[in-house]
Image: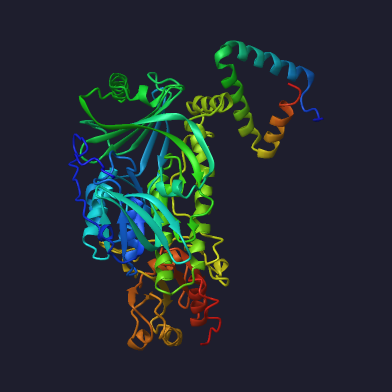
């Protein structure tokens, strides 16, 4: 289980913004948008192992 | 009865010469067994023959066709390949006729999103890339072979059978007059991606094949663009796919493009559709000019290799040994490194200078190189021809990002072929003091070229065998040189001793010295990170197999024994 680094209000803002971005992208481009988001965040984090861990956390329970 | 096509291949620019078929003495039950038979007169087979001849070993090449290859195929030579062709004394025709380049541009949605610059260095004789069609590559090598009395080619001769025992190999060769048996001590299989020898010996390759077909088309067209490699991702006319454009000599342009999934090669080569797509490429280049088609084919990418290249007395080189993706110009450039690695080892074994153990290092060094290329080339291939939805999404994400950010743009670049580093080779000296050097090639790397003057470079001065670069002051290394001369007195090992330093007085030139290079300005010493008393030992393929900040005749001789796999035969170093 990951520890928490965002307040409820912060994660709510991200939740809304991401949902809107997915809707704006449209069904066709949605996967590319999410892949870009992951790459951009990976570059911001700058830590290969943490990003690989994030991928494996996200792939759980789909 | 093997009867290859004897009408010159059609071409809008190249005059195919049909070489004569000659009656073989073996057809009459005559003829002596051969030392080395090379199957295949492609670039790598011919380079192997020329490389063996450097060491006085002759060979016979068996070629099923009677003319050179159809189409531009290999097209790009790297600097390393040019260095190897220089070793074979046939580089000049390539320099005179090829197109030198070092810049690749990649485009997406009309914007240049990536530049690939292959570093050009004043110290190098050759440019990083040189475009020349395979027809010319083969023609120049056939010409070089024609000048070499140690090599002959039997055109129109197809290998249909192979068997071997402890002493040699027996080939069955089919010709227009019927077939004959040909015995040889050694056979080099250089018969390309669809290798007959590999099939006859039922050898399987490891690795994978990639889906996704690409068309290659050579066209003659007057297009006013510089000599650069251009890559277009996802152009409007070919959504989701990519296009490569290369300029070739004689007004020929090479277009490569990926086909939509599910389209067959036959459909893609249908004249009307092909013409429509070529017009689309030219429109995309903003050069809607008239053109004529010279040749077109379809290929797909593989990353496959045999797991051994030495099968008793049959040795595999080039595409016969491995199938590598074209991204990063991996085909002929890898093959030339194979033949350059194999030739001296085979020649040393034949001349009794080394045990057969040396040949197994050919296999281990080059299989390892091929596996690394498969790994690296596989990454490029997965970008150029994504194999699944996930890989396609990530490719599209990187392309989309490239329009505003560059942190992921290197993924658009396929790493270019370069000399392999034999860092873990058994042939490297055990006492290399790599740590003591602040510059210069480490053990396993190729020697670095150094410009010495106009049209004068370090590598020009190397001999055909081993090369010892001895860094000296004005007095030379008298003791070392004298001791080296004594120790090597009765040795047939080809070795060139190159003294590098300031003007050496005459006692300094005593002992074993073949070449003196004046390095008063310290150019070589700086690039090699070497002070007087230090030395580099390079194998005949120019890979460093020993370097010492403080050399001795004993260290050098021990390294020579090790690099020729001769240690066991000469255990007594003071003999």
Estimate the x, y position of residue B473 in percent, counting from the top left. Answer: 41, 80
Question: Which residue is nearer to you in this view: B378 or A30?
Answer: B378
In the displayed structure image, the side of residue B515 where residue A57 appears, left or right: right
Looking at the image, is B323 positioned above or below residue B521?
A: above
Q: Quadrant of the N terminus of chain B?
A: top left
The image quarter containing residue B525 is bottom left
Quarter where residue B339 is shown: bottom left
Residue B414 location in percent, x, y?
A: 46, 39
Q: Residue at x 55, y 14 (%)?
A: A28
Q: How is the image coloured?
A: rainbow
Residue located 50% across and 52% down the image: B369
Q: Residue furthest front?
A: B29
Q: Is residue B299 left or right of residue B221?
A: right
- Whether residue B432 is visible, yes or no, is yes
Front in this rendered view, residue B572 or B560: B572
With respect to residue B323, does B434 lie above or below? below
Measured along the vertical axis of the image, is residue B137 above or below residue B498? above
């Amino acid at each position: 289980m990951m520890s928490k680094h965002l307040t409820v209000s912060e994660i709510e803002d991200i939740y809304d913004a991401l949902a809107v971005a997915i809707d704006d992208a449209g069904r066709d481009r949605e996967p590319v948008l999410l892949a870009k988001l992951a790459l951009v965040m990976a570059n911001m984090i700058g830590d290969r192992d943490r990003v690989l861990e994030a991928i494996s956390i996200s792939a759980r329970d789909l | 009865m093997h009867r290859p096509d004897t009408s010159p291949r059609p071409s809008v620019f190249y005059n195919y010469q049909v070489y004569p078929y000659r009656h073989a003495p073996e057809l009459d039950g005559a003829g002596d067994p051969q030392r080395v038979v090379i199957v295949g007169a492609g670039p790598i087979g011919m380079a192997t023959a020329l490389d063996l001849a450097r060491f006085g070993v002759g060979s016979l090449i068996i070629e099923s066709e009677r003319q050179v290859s159809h189409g531009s195929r290999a097209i790009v030579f790297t600097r390393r390949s040019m260095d190897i062709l220089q070793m074979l004394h046939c580089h000049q025709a390539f320099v005179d006729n090829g197109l030198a380049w070092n810049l690749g541009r990649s485009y997406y949605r009309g914007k240049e999103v990536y530049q690939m610059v292959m570093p050009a260095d004043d110290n190098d004789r050759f440019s990083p890339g040189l475009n020349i069609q395979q027809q010319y590559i083969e023609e120049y090598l056939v010409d070089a072979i024609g000048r070499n009395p140690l090599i002959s080619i039997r055109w129109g001769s197809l290998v249909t059978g192979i068997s071997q025992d402890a002493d040699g190999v027996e080939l069955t060769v089919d010709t227009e007059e019927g077939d004959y048996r040909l015995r040889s001590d050694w056979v080099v299989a250089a018969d390309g991606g669809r290798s007959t020898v590999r099939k006859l010996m039922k050898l399987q390759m490891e690795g994978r094949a990639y889906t996704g077909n690409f068309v290659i088309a050579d066209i003659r067209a007057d297009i006013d663009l510089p000599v650069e490699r251009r890559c277009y991702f996802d152009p409007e006319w070919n959504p989701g796919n990519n296009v490569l454009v290369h300029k070739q000599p004689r007004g020929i342009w090479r277009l490569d493009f990926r086909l939509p999934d599910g389209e067959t090669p036959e459909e893609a080569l249908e004249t009307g559709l092909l013409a429509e797509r070529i017009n689309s490429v030219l429109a995309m280049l903003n050069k809607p000019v008239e053109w004529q088609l010279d040749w077109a084919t379809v290929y797909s990418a593989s990353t496959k290799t045999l797991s051994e290249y030495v099968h008793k007395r049959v040795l595999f080189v080039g595409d016969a040994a491995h199938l590598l993706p074209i991204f990063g110009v991996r085909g002929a450039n890898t093959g030339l490194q194979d033949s350059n690695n194999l030739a001296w080892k085979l020649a040393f074994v034949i001349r009794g200078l080394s045990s057969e153990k040396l040949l197994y290092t050919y296999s281990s060094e080059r299989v390892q190189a091929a596996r690394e290329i498969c790994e690296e080339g596989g990454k490029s291939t997965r970008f150029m021809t994504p194999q699944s939805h996930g890989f396609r999404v990530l490719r599209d994400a990187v392309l989309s990002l490239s329009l505003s950010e560059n942190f992921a743009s290197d993924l658009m670049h396929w790493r270019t072929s370069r000399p392999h580093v034999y860092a873990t080779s058994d042939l490297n000296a055990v006492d290399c003091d790599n740590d003591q050097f602040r510059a210069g090639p480490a053990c396993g790397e190729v020697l670095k070229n150094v410009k010495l003057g106009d049209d004068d470079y370090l590598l020009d001065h190397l001999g055909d065998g081993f090369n010892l670069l001895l860094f000296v002051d004005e007095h030379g290394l008298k003791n070392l040189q004298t001791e080296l001369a004594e120790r090597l007195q009765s040795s047939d090992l080809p070795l060139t001793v190159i003294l590098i330093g300031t003007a050496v007085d005459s006692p300094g030139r005593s002992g074993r010295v073949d070449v003196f290079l004046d390095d008063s300005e310290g150019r070589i010493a700086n690039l090699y990170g070497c002070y007087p008393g230090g030395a580099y030992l390079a194998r005949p393929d120019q890979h460093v197999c020993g370097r010492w900040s403080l050399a001795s005749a004993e260290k050098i001789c021990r390294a020579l024994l090790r690099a020729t796999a001769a240690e066991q035969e000469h255990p007594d170093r003071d003999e």
